[in-house]
Structures are given as C-alpha cells and as structure tokens.
Image (cartoon, helix red, strand yellow):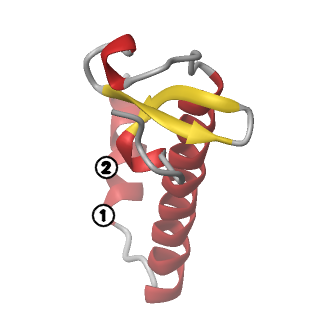
Amino acid sequence: MNNKFDELTKSLAQSVTRRAALKKFSLGLGAMVLACFGLAKKAQSQSSQCQSTRDCPSPLICCKSKSGNVCILRVFCKGPPQF
C-alpha cells in the first residue's frame, strides 16, 4: 500500500512542461464543448408540439421551427417565440 502511495506522490511532484499542460487543458476544454453540444441536441430532441408558451413546462418556451411549434429552451430557439 505504501509503495503505491509513494509512486503516486512522486508522479504528482514531477514537473510538467507548458506544452503538456496546455495539451491536457485543451483536451479537457474540447471535451466540455462536445458535451455541451450533445446536451443541446438532446434538449432539442426531447421537445414537444405546442401552440403557445402556456402549453410548455416551466423552463421551456414555445418556439417556431421548420417542423412546427415546439417546446424548447429559450437559448436554443432560432425562430420567434410563440406567446
């Protein structure tokens, strides 16, 4: 047990080059961006048909789209909201 802990502390204590740190940071940032786009697509796919914003659950609004009016988050509404 102590041997594994010693190896872990030694690896954490080693210096990291700027290039390696920047590479890890950019990979993490890229993963976050991809996750955000994935969540946006999922939110759009779970939308339902509506006539006005009163037909939608609380955080969603009724938004005009190519396939008709749908309940969606305001930030993803590309067309005019239907009040």
Q: Residue furthest right?
A: 67
Q: Please rate how many residues cluster around mark 1, counting C-alpha atoms within 10 Å: few if below 14, some from 14 to 19, many from 20.
A: few
Give yes or no for contact between labels 1 and 2 (Cβ–Cβ under 8 Å): yes
Q: Residue furthest left?
A: 58
Does residue 45 sit above or below 75 in this rendering?
above
Q: Please rate how many residues cluster around mark 2, counting C-alpha atoms within 10 Å: few if below 14, some from 14 to 19, many from 20.
A: few
Numbered circle sitting on residue 80: none
| Residue position for label 1 | 13
The local secondary structure at tag 1 comes to helix
**Location of residue 70 (image quadrant):** top right
Numbered circle sitting on residue 9: 2
- Under mark 2, the amino acid is Thr
Locate residue 19, reporting x and y percent. 52, 86
Near-viewer residue (20 or 43): 43
Tell me which residue sits at (33%, 29%) in the image: 2
The local secondary structure at tag 2 comes to helix
**Left or right of 83, for residue 82:** right
Tell me which residue sits at (38%, 69%) in the image: 14
Locate residue 28, reporting x and y percent. 50, 58
